[in-house]
Image (tube, rainbow, N blue to C red):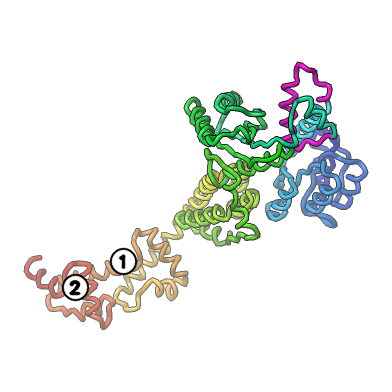
């Protein structure tokens, strides 16, 4: 069984988890609890637990400091961190230490048990892999081809180190120190089954002239090619593989190609190909990615990204979806341009998403919290943006509905003020906002247009011209300057005539003559 240590300065939490969780049922044994990082580290030194479940904020030594110290001295220990909503910076730091399980309080026993089970499975997989490598010396002659494939796979994916490597070179007739190779990773996009991975592997084996290794690694298909045998048509061959596979299954494929290097350094080439593959987060799915495509890292080093999430939250609370959507476009465009480390990019998205959902009522917030895990697991920024936009739209619309009645009352008051002061020369949006309603003029203008479908200035002009037309039609002897004064143009009849003609096609005098003639 794997040993587990609980760490939290709140005794009620450690006592609760100790009693509620059925540790033995998931293959673990609880060795004890600690009240802070200092006490926990002492226990870790003595009892060497496999898993530590720790709160982040604790006196003496907090959870992040504990992770850092343990990671340096006991790197095999795995952590599950517990945190409240307001500790985003801690979560970001935890990612840097490779902590995969960051659970938001409060969390139930099922969530904790799932995280522990995941780590136990990881331990078991590592043990099985190590056991397999240790047993390779006793491999029978009949399974040498399979053993060769596994050796290459271990060499590539796990930086295989063994003092008997010379023995394996002779056994498998490999030139580890001199062979120049290039590594390819195929990633199927969308929903796919193992049979699809097997199919594209067979297609690629048929199209490539020669290869040292083809195998599946997780959800990718790996090809190791001898660089001396690679033709100038490599990209054409890859496109043929992609198009042939798509023709049968309608599933797209992203391909990453490493630089050429020594077979002994295949693990470095594998990591390089993984870096290229992860770059599809920015590039999108279905491309062919090489190291030159991720050169962006050099120009974004050290550049910080700052975004005012409070301003964004104010827009969401205002209920103005057009403004919120524009802000989201600006936010994601900037992240795409910077092309920071993907985990950093996701952490910025995490921060803004967290700020936004905290505007909601507790029940709604808990509903949206379930989307966080989906958001952080997404492998393209386009998918992240789409999910974020859908949640933002729902929350913004909710605020709009809540504010609708209040907004309508305000605009009714504005219309009442316009009707009352239509002949006042200084009547304007700023005057109404500042002198009558004590509101921000820009916000009031946007609100007026949303409610009426018309800008304040256009609405005011239309009402004044309509009033002028009535005066002309009802009072035969009325003068132009008198009309201008009555409808708020003061002592500027010339400007009134220009506005009137623009609106009606006639000057006031022309309109009066036409009206008298039966216009």
Quarter of the image with the C terminus in it: bottom left
Vertical side of 471 occupied by 65: above or below: above
Which residue in the protein does label 1 denote?
458
Left-right relation of 471 to 105: left
* CA neighbours of label 1 inside 10 A, class few (<14), some (14 to 19), many (20+): few
The boundaries of the magenta stretch are 135-162
Disc on res. 471: 2
Name the magenta segment's main secondary structure.
Answer: helix
**Residue drawn at the location 58% of the way across and 60% of the way down:** 307
Q: Is residue 51 above or below residue 127?
A: below
Return the x and y of residue 248 as percentages of the image width and height: 49, 25
Quarter occupied by the N terminus: top right
Extreme residue toward the right, this view: 46
* Magenta segment includes 146: yes
Side of 88 where 46 appears, left or right? right
| 70 is within the stretch colored magenta | no
């Amino acid at each position: 069984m794997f040993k587990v240590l609980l760490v939290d300065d709140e005794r009620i939490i450690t006592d609760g988890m100790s009693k509620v969780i059925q540790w033995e049922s998931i293959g673990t044994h609880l060795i004890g609890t600690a009240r802070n990082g200092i006490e926990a580290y002492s226990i870790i030194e003595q009892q060497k637990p496999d898993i530590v479940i720790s709160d982040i904020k604790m006196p003496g030594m907090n959870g992040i400091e504990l992770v850092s110290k343990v990671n340096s001295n006991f790197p095999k220990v795995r952590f599950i961190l517990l945190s409240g909503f307001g500790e985003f910076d801690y979560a970001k730091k935890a990612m840097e230490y490779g902590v995969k399980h960051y659970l938001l309080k409060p969390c139930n026993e099922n969530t904790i048990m799932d995280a522990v089970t995941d780590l136990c499975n990881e331990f078991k997989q590592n043990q099985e892999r190590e056991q397999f490598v240790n047993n390779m010396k006793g491999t029978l002659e009949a399974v040498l081809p399979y053993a060769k494939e596994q050796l290459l796979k271990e060499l590539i994916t796990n930086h295989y180190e063994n003092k008997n490597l010379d023995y394996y070179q002779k056994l498998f007739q490999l030139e580890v120190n001199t062979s120049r190779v290039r590594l390819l990773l195929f990633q199927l996009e969308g929903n796919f089954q193992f049979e699809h991975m097997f199919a594209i592997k067979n297609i690629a084996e048929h199209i490539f002239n020669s290869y040292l290794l083809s195998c599946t690694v997780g959800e990718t298909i790996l090809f190791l090619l001898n660089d001396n045998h690679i033709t100038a048509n490599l990209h054409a061959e890859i496109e043929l593989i992609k198009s042939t596979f798509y023709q049968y299954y309608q599933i797209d494929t992203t391909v990453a190609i490493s630089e050429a290097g020594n077979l002994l350094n295949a693990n470095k080439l594998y990591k390089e190909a993984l870096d290229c593959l992860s770059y599809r987060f920015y590039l999108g799915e279905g491309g062919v990615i090489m190291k030159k495509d991720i050169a962006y890292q050099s120009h974004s080093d050290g550049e910080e990204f700052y975004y005012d999430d409070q301003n964004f939250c104010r827009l969401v609370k205002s209920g103005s979806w057009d403004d919120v959507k524009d802000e989201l476009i600006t936010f994601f465009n900037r992240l795409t341009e910077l092309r920071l480390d993907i985990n950093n990019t996701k952490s910025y998205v995490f921060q803004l998403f967290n700020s936004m959902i905290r505007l909601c009522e507790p029940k709604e917030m808990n509903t949206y919290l379930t989307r966080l895990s989906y958001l952080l697991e997404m492998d393209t920024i386009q998918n992240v943006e789409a999910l974020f936009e859908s949640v933002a739209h729902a929350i913004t619309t909710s605020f709009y509905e809540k504010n609708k009645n209040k907004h309508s009352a305000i605009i009714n008051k504005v219309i009442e003020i316009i009707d009352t002061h239509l002949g006042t020369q200084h009547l304007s949006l700023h005057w109404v906002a500042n002198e009558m309603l004590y509101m921000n003029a820009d916000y009031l203008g946007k609100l007026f247009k949303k409610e009426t479908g018309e800008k304040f200035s256009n609405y005011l002009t239309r009402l004044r011209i309509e009033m002028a037309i009535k005066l002309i039609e009802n009072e035969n002897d009325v003068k132009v300057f008198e009309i201008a004064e009555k409808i708020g143009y003061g002592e500027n009849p010339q400007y009134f005539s220009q506005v009137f003609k623009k609106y009606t096609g006639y000057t006031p005098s022309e309109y009066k003559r036409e009206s008298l003639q039966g216009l």
